[in-house]
Image (spheres, rainbow, N blue to C red):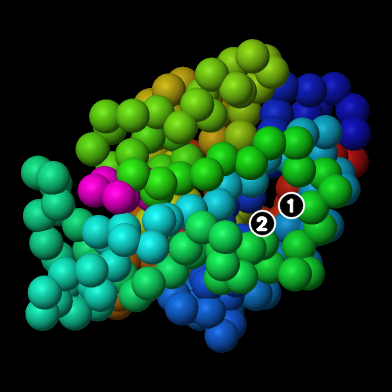
């Protein structure tokens, strides 16, 4: 790991049981990226992970509304909110990292979605952009200017983390074959990729990334 990655970190987004096979909000083929995450972690000097980390009464859960179903969109504290199954409740096994994920390299964990009335897809800010998670301060303190991002889900937490990071001035490289999406609508994943690219994100496969390290 040479100077190439000196100011870089690998950001692992929501590699948790509830987003993987058998989980409450399983992302198709979500598990497939765990071995890639493990391979890359060993090659980079700095690894950060996020965990979706909701209280049981979180208002992004359809079950916490009267007569609402999963996938419905409501207005929550002034902003639009898609309703989800109960997932990633703090302290439950669904919120744990996938058991096959290597955790030895993770230097910092960001918990998000803690505030019951506002969701947080991004690793940096809640969806209303009212409160920061502290990740930006942490990265600045570490001198990190470039993030390599992979994880779940392409059309939610990966996308919003990437867009916020670009706005904050980070260089962003998305490991494209190590992101999987929910795909509530047919074009959501492709649209998310296009939006990230238009905002300035670079896309590479994990093999291209490994080759680039020489
Ligand atoms: C996510 C929906 C709800 C994600 C989190 O990690 O992409 N999606 N909560
Ligand atoms: Zn969530």
- Left/right of residue 10 with respect to residue 26 in the rendered view: right
Q: Is residue 70 above or below residue 61?
A: below
Tell me which residue sits at (65%, 22%) in the image: 144
* Mark 1 Cα shell of 10 Å, populated few (<14), some (14-19), many (≥20): few
* Mark 2 Cα shell of 10 Å, populated few (<14), some (14-19), many (≥20): some
Q: x, y (%) of residue 43?
A: 86, 44
Quadrant where the N terminus is found in the figure? top right
Q: Secondary structure at mark 2?
A: loop
Q: Residue furthest bottom?
A: 22
Is-magenta flag for residue 94? Answer: no
Q: In the rendered image, which quarter is residue 137 located in?
A: top right
Q: x, y (%) of residue 123?
A: 47, 40
Tell me which residue sits at (66%, 62%) in the image: 97
Q: Are marks 1 and 2 in contact (CB under 8 Å)?
A: yes
- Residue 149 visible in the shown view: no
Is-magenta flag for residue 119? Answer: yes
Q: In the rendered image, which quarter is residue 87 located in?
A: bottom left
* Near-viewer residue (211 or 123): 123
Q: Is residue 67 above or below residue 201?
A: below
Label drawn at residue 205: 2
Tell me which residue sits at (89%, 28%) in the image: 2
Q: Secondary structure at mark 1?
A: helix
The stretch in magenta equals 116-121
Q: x, y (%) of residue 47?
A: 73, 40
- Residue 129 visible in the shown view: yes
Q: x, y (%) of residue 48?
A: 67, 40
Magenta span main SS:
loop
Residue assigned mark 1? 208
């Amino acid at each position: 790991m040479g100077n190439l990655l000196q100011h870089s970190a690998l950001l692992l987004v929501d590699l948790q049981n509830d987003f993987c096979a058998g989980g409450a909000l399983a992302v198709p083929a979500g598990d497939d990226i765990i071995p890639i995450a493990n391979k890359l972690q060993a090659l980079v000097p700095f690894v950060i992970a996020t965990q979706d980390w909701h209280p049981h009464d979180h208002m992004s859960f359809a079950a916490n509304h009267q007569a609402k179903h999963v996938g419905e969109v409501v207005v929550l504290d002034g902003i639009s909110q898609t309703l989800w199954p109960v997932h990633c409740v703090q302290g439950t096994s669904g919120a744990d990292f996938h058991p096959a994920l290597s955790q030895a390299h993770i230097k910092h964990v960001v918990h998000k979605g803690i505030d019951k009335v506002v969701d947080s897809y991004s690793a940096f800010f809640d969806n209303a952009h009212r409160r920061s998670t502290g990740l930006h301060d942490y990265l600045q303190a570490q001198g990190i200017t470039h993030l390599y991002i992979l994880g779940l889900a392409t059309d939610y937490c990966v996308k919003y983390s990437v867009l916020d990071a670009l706005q904050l001035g980070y260089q962003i490289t998305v490991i494209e074959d190590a992101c999987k999406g929910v795909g509530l609508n047919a074009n959501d994943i492709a649209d998310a990729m296009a939006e990230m690219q238009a905002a300035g994100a670079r896309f590479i496969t994990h093999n291209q990334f490994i080759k680039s390290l020489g």
